[in-house]
Image: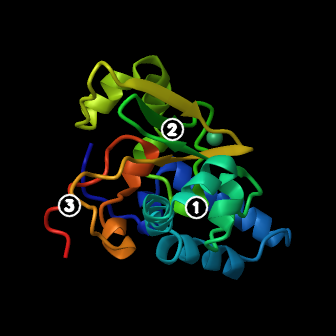
Amino acid sequence: MSVKHDHDDHSHMTETEARVRALETLLSAKGYIDSAAVDRIIQTYETKIGPQNGAHVVAKSWCDPEFAAWLRRDATAAIHSLGYISRQGEHMEAVFNSDDVHHLTVCTLCSCYPWSVLGLPPTWYKSPPFRSRAVIDPRGVLREFGLDLPTTTKVEVHDSTAEIRYLVIPQRPAGTEGFSEDQLVQLVTRDTMIGTAVALLPEGVA
Ligand code: FE
């Protein structure tokens, strides 16, 4: 097949993109959605709502034991108190990693994800291999992400649904005792809050 195309940009859309475009056009023509509003929502998720929100939740839980306790008890309310609100009305559950247990979150059915704290999901999170293998062989999946856990650490997999989304709270790295909340935020990546990574080591953080 020739690599060179002479078509316009539309021919470069994937099947899913084309389907989304067709759906959006139809819904908008029927007056169910407003294209400008859809663009605003997408832009919000691209620029304002992202893993930095979740990292703030994690860093605060590391610094503030009362907040951590609240997060364990009622993650939806604790997260809400920081201004991060679920637009689909789903409940949040925070699962805390320890030496004994490591948490991993997945949506085996589709792609449920804690949008309010992590923003847009990575492509691999929505891929069928991740969704099926995360439950069949979580340890193997984690190894592929470069995370080789000791056999003494139990791996617990949480299957997200339309009603419940999980936020993995990684362990606070050693050597960060004097760190401020802002410095700690920099150690918390998106993947640490999905559970495919652990928090970064403190070296190099200003
Ligand atoms: Fe889902």
Q: Residue 202: give its label.
A: 3
**Which residue is at a point 68% across and 48% down the rendered structure image?**
73
Viewer-nearest residue: 174 or 193:
174
The spot of residue 123 in percent (x, y) is 43, 48
Looking at the rendered image, the disc whose residue lies closer to the viewer, 2 or 3, is 3
**Which residue is at a point 68% across and 82% down the rendered structure image?**
36
Q: Secondary structure at mark 1?
A: helix
In the depicted structure, whether residue 58 falls above or below residue 104: below
Q: Residue 34's quadrant in the figure?
A: bottom right
Q: Earlier in the sequence, mark 2 or mark 3?
A: 2
Viewer-nearest residue: 65 or 137:
65
Q: Amino acid at mark 2?
A: Thr
**Which residue is at a point 85% across and 68% down the rendered structure image?**
30
Looking at the rendered image, the disc whose residue lies closer to the viewer, 1 or 3, is 1
Q: Residue 105: give its label.
A: 2
CA separation, marks 1 and 3? 23 Å
Q: Amino acid at mark 1?
A: Phe
The spot of residue 105 in percent (x, y) is 51, 38
- Where does label 1 land, which residue? 67
CA separation, marks 2 and 1? 22 Å
Q: Amino acid at mark 3?
A: Pro
